[in-house]
Amino acid sequence: MSERVLIVEDCLSLSEQLLNYLELVGLKADVVESLSCAIQALEKVAYGLIVLDLELPDSSGVQTLERLLAHSNGSKIVIYSGGVDQGTQRLADIHKIVVQVKGQVAAQQLVALIGKTLKSPKATRALARLQTKLAVSIRGLEQTN
């Protein structure tokens, strides 16, 4: 399975944050801002994982997921969206798609989930190093205060 990630997100600041975290853990990622651009990208590149926002400029809700599934070529999907209606949740459950709600999961936690979903040893090791560095930094800040 490819370790390349497609981020389908129309919020530039969030997609940049995710992209930066993914690059820190050694994963390659592409970002698109609409479903039509995601479909075009999927026609050209084999992605191991798609991080999907359901509310896009050209599609929303269950229609977004249905259309993406039709073009996903077996890529795993993680929904990272502001909310999920019952129909979308049922479809996600059928296809064993992980759903994370924005605001409840930080971008760093999402990257950890991406690493696990891809079963990427490289990403897992890099995340462990990042978490250790973060813990050391926090302890250093606590000691200076």
Image (tube, helix red, strand yellow):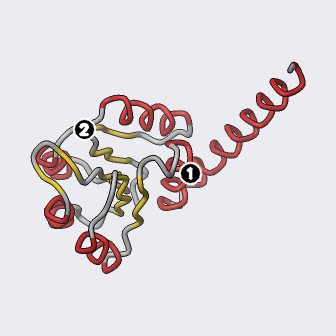
Residue nearer the viewer, 101 or 108? 101
Q: Of the residues tagged 1 and 2, which is closer to the observer?
A: 2
Please give the count of numbered marks on the rendered protein: 2
Up-down: is 86 above or below 145?
below
In percent of width and height, residue 64 lies at 17, 58
Q: Which mark is residue 10?
A: 2
Residue that label 1 marks: 112
Q: Assign the N terminus to one quadrant of the image.
A: bottom left
- In the image, what residue type sits under mark 1? Ala
Q: Assign the C terminus to one quadrant of the image.
A: top right
In percent of width and height, residue 77 lies at 34, 61
Residue at coordinates 51% horizontally, 50% vertically from top-left?
A: 105
Look at the numbered disc 1 and give the secondary structure of its residue: helix
The outermost residue toward the top is 144
Look at the numbered disc 2 and give the secondary structure of its residue: loop
Give left or right: position of 24 versus 72: right
In percent of width and height, residue 115 lies at 53, 53
Up-down: is 47 above or below 99?
above
Residue at coordinates 46% horizontally, 47% vertically from top-left?
A: 103
Give left or right: position of 62 versus 101: left
Q: Residues within 10 Å of mark 1 (few under 14, many from 20)?
A: some
- Mark 1–mark 2 Cα distance, whole angstroms, equals 21 Å
Residue at coordinates 87% horizontally, 19% vertically from top-left?
A: 144
Give left or right: position of 61 versus 9: left
